[in-house]
Image: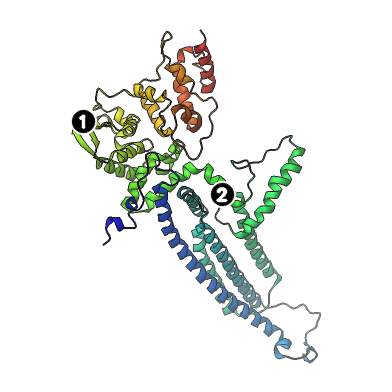
Amino acid sequence: MLSIGNDPNNYEDKYPEDKIHEETAPNARVYRTYVDESKKRDDKMVEESKDSVDVLLVFAGLFSAVISASLLFEMVLIQRAVANGSSLDNVPMSSLNPYTKFTPATTDVWVNGLWFTSLCLSLTTALVAVLVKQWLHHYIDLPSGTPQERSHVRQFRYGGFEKWHVLGIIGLLPGLLHLALGIFFVGLTIFLVPLRPGFSWVIGVGTVAAYTTYLITIFLPILYPQCPYRTPLSDLVYFPYRYITQDLFPKHVRPLFVKEVQWPTDESGAKISSLDDRERRVVRNESATLSVEALHWLYSSSSNPTVHVIVVQSIGGLSLSAMDAVKKVFGEAKHIRDAHYTLLESSIQYVGGGCKKPLPGMESKVERLLRFELFIPHLYYYSDDHKLRCYIDAADDKGLAVAVQSNNTLQRSLHKPHNSPTSTAFFLQVALADDVKLLPAIWFGLMRTAKNDGAFAPIDIDSLDDFPLRLCCYVDVRPSTPPATVPCATFHAAVHCYFPKECSEEFTINMLNVISKFDQFVDKTSFPPTFTFALAFVRYMLP
């Protein structure tokens, strides 16, 4: 048996522990773990799919050859002169009146129709099988980059595989061949020769439908970046498509109707030049959601306990914009919540007085587990006994102290020591400091615990405290879209650059409540918070 240190599946030993606040950094071990785990599963899935498709291709080729030979044999029987090697002059004339309309037997028509239909299905199956092999090759051909980038691209493509039912299409291919084989045997039992024109329409419609579908699968990856039906032909078609949509149409057609033309570009200002560039842009824009989906997939698809430990500790490192995605993807999160509770309790010890503290060397682990609760609340959060939760003593660890202060259930605990700073005092101390840099999610947690403590209650008009003025200057009246990778920042920078729109609006509403005595539009709920705040702040500043 392998020892823990030599176990390739023990990712806690395989990859070094992340630095604090870097649990979802581009080179974090959770993404390295994701790359390893996804590679195992994808290799197995692709190998099985390729084996199945290869068998189908061989069978479709042999079966199509048999049908073609049968059809050729029937046509040879019809053309007796060619079959016997006789001259056309030696072929006896028919006793029938040449002007008499010839009507083939119904059975002859059915045989030829069924066999041609069978051949059409067989060749269509072979065509789709070739396309599937190209789709699989594109799926496993991940671009180079950091483990985070590779994880996001793989999760993006995996989502496309699920959404566009690629495995379902592979599963339908044997059914098509089975149907073709059945039709062939029905025609073989009837054993008749000529075709009616009506059946040529059937074959023609089937062929047109197959090639129409084929053309659609070429254009779908161009129109929908997550569509996995991508083949090399899609890349070739994208170049004229790009020329028409990004050059010809904007420069020569749209100017006839609008004065200024702006076409979507990537972050650097360059136009999207290839499908790979387009995929990278979409992955970048959806990185927060993809991170959550990747962690959820890794946790739910693996039974390895070390994988679960790493995922639980990594959730607290997600960006603030991923909070809604966590709720949507993880749902009630019962299993991961139970795992978090077990992991946290095994990392702390009871010291009396309703307080616990981390075991020696477990401070950083406990800090990560507390940040987990910013996204998925503790079990006690939904319990009537949440105030009975033991308080966690941060001792002299500043990072752990911040995590404790941002934790809602811990701040409401009845066991919180009386000498601990209030949530309001702690928030104002760190938020107004210029040298304290924290993750935006932590700042948001500190803001909410401070709000519950009354930090944003209306101020006295005659108060000389300057904290409302300083915090009001942090309000961002034009919230921007936060970047994909969110570093630690001061509270001011976090609000302006890294808070999503809804979080920025919550801070604006909090500050509006602070200066609510200067708000003339208290009853005008239809006004945007930034508008009413700006007017109230002007009145607050006037002597």
- Quadrant of residue 61 within the rendered picture: bottom right
Q: Earlier in the sequence, mark 1 or mark 2?
A: 2
Out of 528 and 179, give the one closest to the viewer. Answer: 528
**Left of 516 or right of it: where is 368?**
left
Position of residue 168 relative to residue 248, above or below, is below
Task: Give me the residue at 80% from left, 83% from top.
Answer: 97
Out of 70 and 60, give the one closest to the viewer. Answer: 60
Task: Give me the residue at 45% from left, 21% from top.
Answer: 471
| Amino acid type at image mark 2 | Glu
Which numbered disc covers residue 279? 2
Task: Give me the residue at 51% from left, 70% from top.
Answer: 54
| Amino acid type at image mark 1 | Gly
The residue singled out by tag 1 in the image is 354
How far from the left and from the top, in percent, is residue 171? Answer: 49, 63
**Left of 249 or right of it: where is 499?**
left
Position of residue 460 relative to residue 379, above or below, is above
- Quadrant of residue 443 within the rendered picture: top left
Position of residue 16 relative to residue 214, above or below, is above
Element type where label 2 sits in the image: helix
Say how many tags the image has. 2
Position of residue 142 relative to residue 357, above or below, is below
**Left of 304 or right of it: where is 117?**
right
